[in-house]
Structure formats: C-alpha cells, structure tokens
Image (spheres, helix red, strand yellow):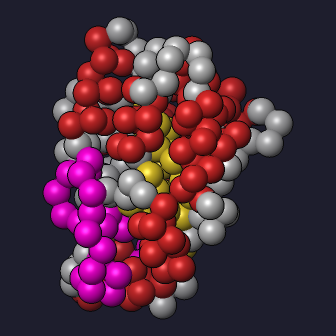
Amino acid sequence: MADTLMTHFIAGYPSVEESLKVGKALVAGGASYLEMQIPYSDPTADGPVIAAACDEALAAGFKVDRAFDMCRELTSLEGAVPVFLMSYGGIVYNAGVEAFVARAKEAGASGLIIPDLAPGADEGLAEACKKAGLFCVPVLIPGVTDGRMEEVLADKPEWVYLALRRGITGTLTELGPENMDTLDKLKAQNVKIMAGFGIQQRSQVESVAPHCDAVIVGSQVIRTVNECPAGDYSKLEAFVQELIG
C-alpha cells in the first residue's frame, strides 16, 4: 500500500514558502505522488476546506507563475516524486491551452488534472498534453454510464481520476457497491486509476488501494496543515505515514 498514496495540497497555502515545505513533508512522509492545486477563485469540485485555503492563497497575491516555479523546485529535489498539477479550465484557457501545457512540462509536471475541461469539450487539452508528453487525467464519477466511459477511454488516457462520489469533496465518503463497482469496471479497462474525494482515514486507503493505482487524500491533508505550527510539518509527515501504514 505504501506506493499508492497521492496527497493533495495547495500551492501558496499557507504561503508560498510554507507550501513548499508542505510538499516536501508529504514526500518525506511517504507519499508516492503529489497533486498540487493551483488556486482558482471559482472552483467546481472543492469542498469548504480546500476552497478556504485557495481563497487565502489568492488573497495573499498568489499567481499562477509561482505554481510553475514551485513545481520545478519540487521535481528537482533528490527523491522527488511525480507531481500532477490540478486546477480549473479558466486558468488554462486564460493562459492558452498549449502555452499552459508547455509550461507545465517545462516545470517537470507529470500530468494535469483539470476537472471542468472534460473529454469532448476540453479546448484541445488532451491533444496538447499528448504532444508534450504529459498525462491528461479525465475525471469520472461513480455510476458513469458505459457509453460515457467508452467515450473517455477512447482517447486512451494513461490515468483516469475516479471521484468516489458526486458533488464536492471535503466530507467523509462512504465506500459501497456503486463507487467500488465503478473502480473495478475501470480497472478492467487497462488504465491506471487515481481515486479520491472524501478519503480521510487509513481504513479507507486500505479498502480502496487494491482497486486502483493511487489513493488521493486532500481535504484531510489541508486540515492537518492547519494544525501544524508554521515551519514544522512533523505532524503532517506522521499523518502520511499513518495513512500508508
């Protein structure tokens, strides 16, 4: 299970310098992947904990350019893990899809997760990622129809993100037949799966990990960051260690 954890954090929160320390602490704790969110003022999937952190980063003046700098720094560290940049379509479209993808690639990102640029209406994101050698990660939800799953997988993505419930993230997700069955249907399609939304506890990670390639923990990471004194993220490292066992 130790190689299946992806941890989500916010670029620029609690500050640029502190968020870099957060990213390093997550890796030190044992995370195998980082999902670094570029804060955006009009999110569609963020729960209240993540939304509040993004608002604070934006209020402090965080800019998209700094996210690329942070990605570059994190991916250049000894022992670096793959970094997936997550944000929303407005940021990508404003920068220009191809320009944004090129900058992400230059900064060392492994892939992009842009939930509101969905396959079939993605403004050319998947094609630009393919040309640049970046993973473009589409997002699906439990109970997705077979037809829609086929449409998404027709682009042959390397990774697919399954949000383990509908709506926004932030509260504990109950794992049951619908989300687990959808995971298993995806698993049979020869695609790598990252699965998240409401994963907060080791028991959930243990339940989901056999059905996917990366279990994502986000809001609970931010809650733990909020409990850490500035500059000391030992509690965050311990939380990651607890999640992976």
Q: Is residue 223 left or right of residue 213?
A: left
Q: Is the N terminus in the top left, top right, bottom left or bottom right quadrant?
A: bottom right
Q: Nearer the viewer, residue 227 or 118?
A: 227
Residue at x 48%, y 84% (from the top left corner): 187
Mark count: 0
Q: Which residues are magenta?
A: 153-181
Above-or-below relation of 188 to 122: below
Above-or-below relation of 225 to 241: above
Residue 155: x, y in percent? 44, 73
Kindly tell me whether residue 124 is visible in this rendering.
no
Q: Is residue 232 left or right of residue 28?
A: left
Q: Main secondary structure of the magenta part?
A: loop
Q: Nearer the viewer, residue 45 or 136?
A: 45
Above-or-below relation of 14 to 244: above
Residue at x 30%, y 42% (from the top left corner): 89
Q: Is residue 221 left or right of residue 237?
A: left
Residue at the top extreme, as displayed: 60
Above-or-below relation of 57 to 156: above
Q: Is residue 44 left or right of residue 103?
A: left
Residue at x 66%, y 44% (from the top left corner): 29
Residue 88: x, y in percent? 31, 41
Residue at x 35%, y 43% (from the top left corner): 219
Q: Is residue 204 magenta?
A: no
Kindly tell me whether residue 227 is visible in this rendering.
yes
Residue at the right extreme, as displayed: 78
State which quadrant residue 121 falls in: bottom left
Q: Is residue 159 magenta?
A: yes
Q: Nearer the viewer, residue 23 or 39?
A: 23
Residue 110: x, y in percent? 61, 50
Residue 217: x, y in percent? 44, 52
